[in-house]
Image (tube, rainbow, N blue to C red):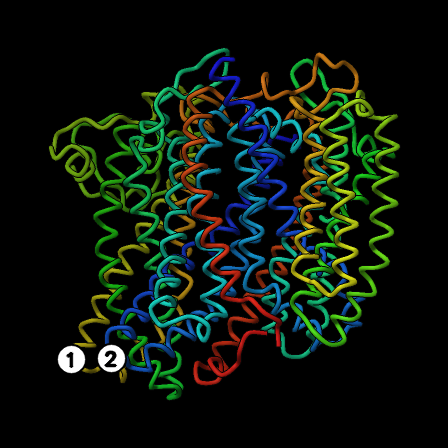
């Protein structure tokens, strides 16, 4: 294999890792946001507890998205250009949500009269991206119409087909599970117990969506039924889910959170296995697909970026763990 | 209205609104580090308390800065996808590097800065403050690297219509990176300095929170005078670079139509593009030639030397540049008066000067905006100077009505954010440091 190819494959995997890291980490604060009205029943004291549980860390979590987006831009400019321009309105909705949630926590702190409004905006700002991320991913897996210059030729409604909607809901349940296991880990009393009950229900939703998306993938995604790595990842994901259920029952909250995270990461494993080496599938003609090999940056750019990522990310992970440890334990 | 035009409007809106906040983040970050360092060295509670107060304000500025910054990273793909395809090989890398090397640093440690004072040691807290400061400046560096490459591209070749990287270091540290970085950073420090000086002045006028206001005013004023004079140096370096590497931009900024030996430095004027003439021109003879080439009779190229289709919008480039320079002069004068009053021990009693500080709070941010506009508008019609025109850089698949829709969305959200920013900011200031530092987190 040539150096360029190795670099292209490496970056395909690294970008998957960055997005999976984002999903797992921002997943829990997105999940908490999406369940805020149910978990807190609009009680400001409870909102405050949940905000304190994510306040010190959510900013860093969101940087995983910024970095994944930047890395996609740097490593595979065509994939970045096609998806971001093709999914224009959907991504603008995501941005709307991200802006809203980024300021909500701060405004909630500062607001004196009607704090509740900022709990609502945090909810809206969280639930929109939580659903749309999975829809976007489902679309690039199933494929979208592309032309010879790699441009998206569908429209907004192209994005709303059954398979992408199913992956959207699957991703949403995964995010909810992240939020619930994190809530159990970080809180006690009423919120904790509400989260535990909810986790039991969401778990069934998760399994149903998982199976539903799997069945649809046999119809919508070419070759999915005989992709061995995807099967392994699916087994790992399901296994982790069952482990999570058991650990939640036993009150092993940290392990339950890890199991939920592993289930989510395995979902990314399935996506990666189904995709490789395709980044954006062309549904009209497989030859027009955008792949790691026809859409990448130059060998020099990929090498420089790899150096930066290998030097930088271990340090990032190191100090992130440190800061999580500073805030370990239940929020009072 | 076509989609390209609308995308320009949207980018101007998104970048312009976002750029209210980063300069303040840079300046306030520095002030927090200064106070934390003083606390670490002297162990005096007042510095810790000042820092606590500043951190609360910083949190608000940072939150809005982050939320509006994401929009820009998305924008290259959503609205400028042709640009992303053509130059992604070079332009994407600094954005990714910014995430990995800088943005993580500031965003993770701001968690400690905001909530961790009782959870970590004094030294670790200082280190966290420093890392937030350092991370935000490093972040600025990568963004300036990316933007400077658009101004003075280097380290690449064109292959099959795409820019391909040949030398990462040459692309990153191109002809304008260093000057533009220093100029932007110091603009941020000025913004933070006058921001805090103005707030402190208000407390002194109101005769309240004086224990805080006096040291805050002293520290910010000293920072203000240092940065205001340093800014002449960085501004000069940057202007010389523009004259040498982007001569059309310099001619537009100076409203210089005909090439001239011994060109004057323009102080005032109204350039009219259709008549190729600058009205009511006031200039200092030969100064432009002296400043660029250190030679009173050196020739400076005028706009008429270049084809009209390569002219940027002259009026806007000229005026934004001049407003920025005028404000720069004002800041130097103001800071000198302030330090003079400080040494004569009259500062706290000179009410007119305190009011002046209060009412000029937004001006350094406006100067930053003007400078940024001069740089970006002056680069037109190019997105990447001499490589790719802005008109050819937009997304081809996004219809105009969608961009119009999102312009409306951003206008509404950003107007609301601005109103809320002012509301919460004034609310915090009115409460005062004494009250603010008692309130914990959420």
Question: Which quadrant does the N terminus of chain B fall into?
Answer: top right
In which quarter of the view is residue B241 placed? top left
Q: Nearer the viewer, residue B266 or A181?
A: A181
- Kindly identify which residue carries mark 2: B347
Q: Residue at x 42, y 39 (%)?
A: B315
- Say what secondary structure mark 1 lies in: loop
Disc 1: which chain?
B
Disc 2: which chain?
B
Q: Is residue B177 left or right of residue A239?
A: left
- Say what secondary structure mark 2 lies in: helix
In which quarter of the view is residue B318 placed? top left
Q: Nearer the viewer, residue B327 or A305?
A: A305
Q: Residue at x 27, y 83 (%)?
A: B348
Are labels 2 and 1 assigned to the same chain? yes
| Residue B35 x/y as whole percent | 31, 71
Reply above or below: A88 against B113: above
| Residue A273 x/y as whole percent | 70, 28
Reply above or below: A208 against A186: above
Q: Nearer the viewer, residue A325 or B410?
A: A325
Let me know if residue A187 appears in the view.
yes
In which quarter of the view is residue A328 placed? bottom right
* Within-10-Å neighbours for mark 1: few <14, some 14–19, many 20+: few
| Residue B94 x/y as whole percent | 43, 36
- Kindly identify which residue carries mark 1: B344
Q: Nearer the viewer, residue A195 or B247?
A: A195
Question: Which quadrant does the C terminus of chain B fall into?
Answer: bottom right
Cβ–Cβ under 8 Å for marks 2 and 1: yes
Q: Residue at x 32, y 59 (%)?
A: B190
Question: Which label was assigned to residue A53?
Answer: none
**How many angstroms separate mark 2 from mark 1 (CA)?**
8 Å
Q: Is residue A327 left or right of residue A249?
A: left
């Amino acid at each position: 294999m040539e150096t360029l190819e190795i670099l292209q494959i490496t970056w395909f995997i690294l970008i998957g890792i960055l997005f999976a890291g984002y999903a797992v980490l921002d997943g829990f604060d997105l999940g908490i946001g999406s369940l805020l009205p149910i978990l807190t029943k609009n009680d400001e004291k409870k909102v405050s507890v949940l905000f304190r549980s994510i306040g010190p860390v959510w900013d860093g979590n969101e940087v995983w998205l910024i970095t994944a987006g930047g890395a996609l831009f740097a490593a595979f400019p065509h994939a970045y250009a096609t998806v971001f321009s093709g999914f224009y309105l959907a991504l603008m909705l995501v941005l709307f949500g991200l802006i809203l949630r980024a300021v909500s926590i701060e405004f909630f702190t500062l607001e004196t009269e009607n704090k509740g409004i900022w709990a609502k905006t945090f909810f809206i700002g969280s639930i929109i991206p939580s659903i749309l991320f999975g829809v976007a991913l489902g679309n690039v897996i199933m494929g979208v119409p592309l032309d010879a210059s790699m441009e998206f030729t569908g429209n907004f409604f192209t994005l709303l087909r059954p398979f992408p909607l199913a992956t959207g809901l699957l991703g949403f349940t995964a995010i909810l599970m992240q939020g619930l296991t994190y809530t159990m880990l970080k809180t006690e009393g009423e919120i904790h117990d509400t989260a535990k009950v909810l986790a039991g229900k969401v778990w069934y939703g998760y399994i149903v969506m998982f199976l539903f998306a799997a069945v649809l993938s046999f119809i919508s995604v070419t070759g999915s039924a005989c992709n061995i790595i995807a099967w392994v990842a699916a087994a790992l994901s399901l296994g982790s889910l069952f482990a999570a259920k058991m650990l939640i029952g036993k009150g092993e909250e940290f392990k339950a959170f890890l199991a939920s995270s592993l289930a989510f990461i395995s979902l990314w494993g399935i996506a990666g296995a189904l995709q490789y080496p395709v980044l954006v599938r062309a549904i009209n003609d497989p030859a027009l697909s955008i792949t790691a090999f026809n859409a990448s940056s130059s060998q020099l750019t990929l090498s420089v970026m790899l150096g930066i990522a290998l030097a930088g990310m271990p340090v990032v992970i190191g100090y992130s763990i440190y800061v999580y440890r500073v805030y370990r334990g239940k929020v009072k | 209205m076509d989609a390209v035009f609308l995308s320009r409007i949207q980018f101007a809106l998104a970048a312009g609104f976002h750029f209210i906040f980063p300069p303040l983040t840079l300046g306030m970050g520095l002030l927090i580090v200064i106070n934390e360092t003083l606390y670490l060295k002297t162990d005096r509670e007042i510095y810790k308390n000042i820092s606590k107060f500043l951190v609360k304000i910083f949190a608000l500025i940072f939150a809005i800065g982050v939320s509006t910054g994401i929009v820009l990273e998305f924008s290259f793909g959503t609205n400028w996808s042709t640009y992303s395809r053509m130059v992604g090989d070079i332009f994407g890398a600094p954005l990714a590097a910014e995430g990995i090397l800088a943005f993580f640093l500031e965003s993770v440690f701001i968690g400690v800065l905001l909530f961790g004072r009782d959870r970590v040691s004094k030294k670790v807290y200082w280190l966290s403050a420093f890392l937030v400061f350092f991370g935000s400046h490093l972040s600025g560096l990568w963004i300036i690297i990316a933007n400077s490459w658009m101004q003075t591209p280097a380290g690449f070749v064109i292959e099959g219509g795409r820019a391909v990287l040949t030398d990462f270091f040459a692309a990153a540290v191109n002809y304008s990176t260093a000057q533009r970085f220093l100029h932007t950073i110091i603009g941020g420090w000025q913004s933070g300095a006058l921001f805090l000086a103005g707030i402190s002045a208000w407390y002194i006028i109101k005769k309240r929170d004086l224990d805080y206001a006096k040291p805050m005013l002293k520290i910010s004023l000293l920072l203000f005078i240092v940065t205001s004079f340093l800014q002449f140096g960085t501004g000069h370096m940057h202007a010389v670079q523009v004259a040498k590497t982007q001569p059309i931009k310099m001619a537009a900024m100076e409203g210089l139509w005909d090439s001239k030996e011994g060109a004057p430095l323009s102080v005032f004027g109204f350039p009219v593009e259709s008549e190729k003439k600058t009205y009511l021109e006031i200039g200092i003879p030969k100064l432009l030639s002296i400043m660029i080439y250190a030679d009173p009779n050196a020739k400076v190229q005028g706009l008429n030397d270049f084809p009209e289709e390569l002219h940027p919008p002259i009026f806007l480039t000229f005026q934004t540049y001049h407003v920025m320079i005028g404000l720069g002069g004002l800041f130097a004068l103001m800071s000198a008066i302030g330090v003079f009053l400080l040494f004569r021990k009259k500062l706290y009693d000179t009410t007119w000067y305190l009011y002046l500080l209060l009412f000029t709070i937004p001006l350094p941010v406006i100067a930053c905006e003007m400078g940024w506009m001069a740089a970006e508008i002056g680069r037109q019609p190019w997105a990447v100077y001499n490589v790719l025109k802005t008109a050819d850089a937009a997304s081809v698949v996004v219809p105009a009505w969608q961009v119009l829709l999102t312009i409306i969305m951003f206008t509404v959200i950003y107007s609301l954010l601005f109103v809320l920013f002012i509301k919460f900011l004034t609310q915090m200031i009115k409460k005062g440091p004494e009250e603010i530092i008692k309130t914990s987190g959420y």
